[in-house]
Image (spheres, rainbow, N blue to C red):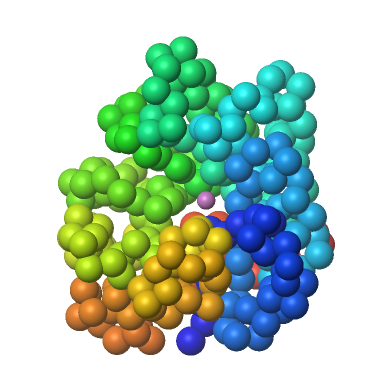
Amino acid sequence: MRIFDTHAHYDDDAFDEDRETLIPQIHEGGIEYIVNVGASIETTRSTLALASKYDYIYAAVGVHPSDIKDLNEETYKWLAEQTKQPGVVAVGEIGLDYYWDKEPEVQENQRTWFRRQLDMARKANLPVIIHSREAAKDTYDIMVEEKAGDIGGVVHCYSYSKEMALDYVKMGFFIGVGGVVTFPKAKKLKETVEAVPMEHIVIETDCPYLAPNPYRGKRNTSLNLPYVIAEIASIKGLSEEEVAEIVYDNALKLYRMTGGRSFCQL
Ligand code: NI
């Protein structure tokens, strides 16, 4: 079974103690590729460092809505330059998060930098990784206005309705599914997985967060992805091998790695 973790944070403090031994173990354990995702200027730097150290780790560069205080014209320009680094396959994670930020001015700022990072992705010809929490309508409206369908990408850790998931599918987007799908009470997400065509689903850990059952609450790693695959297989009535193969191919398409490793000049 070949596995592609489309969204991980191996630069997180939670991996400080054993990162150097854990990452090669994960790769030997069948995780063929990992996209490590930046969420601030600092974690974009550490993500780029991981991608240059391990040839099976790729990078997404971007600033999460809860960290937009990092962004100004200077850091935006720096970020845009990083999109040209070898091993960079996406701009992300970017989007809106109204759960943590309630003030109208902060939310307005989030929308501004979301639009600008969409524009960055368009100019760099890279797909986007969307983070959206308690901001379903504004996220979707901005993506329609900014013609995100022409940019492409994934709505990561998808948590909204199945109807909206199908709207994203129509836009050509992938739906990112992780450990949450294994939780017994995740009825909405299970319905979404049932409704979304298999060709639009990718799997992710968002590690160190969101470990699937039976490891819920513990530190997550890519080695737990078979639990996510098993749950999707049971919802879809497919074998685990079939699901693994389809989501692996989907991840290559999402990050435009279908041409093999020659696409980047490592
Ligand atoms: Ni993340």
Observer able to see residue 36: no
Residue 214 lies, with reference to residue 193, above or below; the image says below
Q: Which residue is drawn at 72% across and 72% down?
A: 18
Q: Is residue 244 left or right of residue 109?
A: left
**Number of marks drawn:** 0
**Residue drawn at (54%, 62%), measured in percent from left and top?**
207
Residue at point 76%, 22% (across, down):
74
Q: In this view, does 51 lie to the left or right of 237?
A: right
**Residue 43 is drawn in which quadrant?**
top right
Q: Is any atom of residue 79 visible in this view?
A: yes
Residue 193 in the image, given as x and y percentages of width and height: 25, 63
Q: Quadrant of residue 98?
A: top left
Residue 36 placement (x, y as % from top left): 63, 57
Q: Quadrant of the C terminus?
A: bottom right
Q: Which sits in the foreground, 72 or 174? A: 72
Task: Name the residue nearer the viewer: 124 or 30.
Answer: 30
Residue 209 screen position, x and y as percent: 49, 59
Is 151 above or below relative to 181?
Answer: above
Q: Of all residues shown, which one is farthest toward the top?
A: 105
Please provide percent x and percent y for residue 83.
70, 42
| Residue shown at the point (47%, 35%) measured from the top left | 95
Quarter occupied by residue 27:
bottom right
